[in-house]
Amino acid sequence: MPFTNLNSTHLTEVEQAAISEAINSLRALLQPIAVNLTPEERKRYGSINELNKGIVNKAKSFNDAQPALSSPDVDWTEFTNDYNMRAFIENTLQSLYGMVKDLESSKILFDFDNYTAANADYAYTMYKLKSGDVGYQTKYDEMKQFYSRTNTPETPTEP
C-alpha cells in the first residue's frame, strides 16, 4: 500500500457514544457554575496574575493560621469556597487541556492518513484515465480542482 497509517487505532461506535454521553454529563454537571462572559466582561474582570495570586494565597494563609487578624468585612466562608472552586477548576482545566492536545494530535494523524490515501486515489484515477478505462473522467474532473496546475498535491498543513 503506498501510504502509511500513522494512527490505525479506532474507537468503536459504542465507545464513541460513551464519550459523547460522558461529555454531555460533564456539561450538565458544570452548568450550575458555567458563566459565559462577554468580551467586555472578560476584559473588565481579567485574570489575576501570579503576583495577585500570591496576595490571595497569603490572605488565605493568614486567615487559616490566625483568623483573628482577618478583616470582618470579608465573608471568609465564601472566600474559602471561591478559593477551593478556583483550584478545582484550574486542575480540571489542566486535565481537559491535556485531553484536547491529545485529541488534536490524533486528529492530525487521521487527517494525514486520509490526505495521503486521497492523493493515492487521485494518482490511481489519473493512471486509469490515461489507460483509457471508462468512468474515471468525471472523478478526475471533480478532484483536479483541489490540485495545482502541475497536478502536485499541496503539502498538508496543521489545523
Image (cartoon, helix red, strand yellow):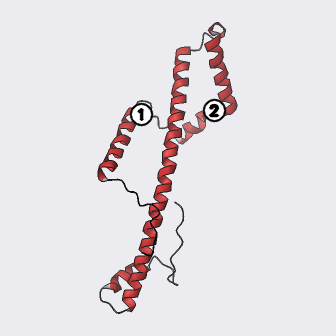
Can residue 70 be seen in this snapshot?
Answer: no
Which of the two labelled residues, at mark 1 and mark 2, occupies the earlier sequence position? Answer: 1
Determine which residue is flagged by label 1: 30
Could you tell me the amino acid type at mark 1?
Answer: Leu
Q: Which mark is residue 101?
A: none
Work out which quarter of the rendered image holds the N terminus and state it: bottom left
Which residues make up the magenta segment?
A: 1-7
Check the image and report above or below for 128 versus 2: below
Mark 2 residue crowding within 10 angstroms, few (<14) / some (14–19) / many (20+): few
Q: Is residue 142 left or right of residue 74?
A: left
In x, y percent, where is residue 12? 32, 53
In the figure, residue 2 lies in which quadrant?
bottom left
Q: CA distance from mark 1 to mark 2?
A: 22 Å
Q: Residue at x 35, y 37 (%)?
A: 25
Residue at the spot x=42%, y=72% of the render? 117
Residue 59 seen anywhere in this rendered image of the structure: yes
Task: Identify which residue is drawn at 37% across, 92% down.
Answer: 131
* Residue that numbered label 2 is attached to: 48
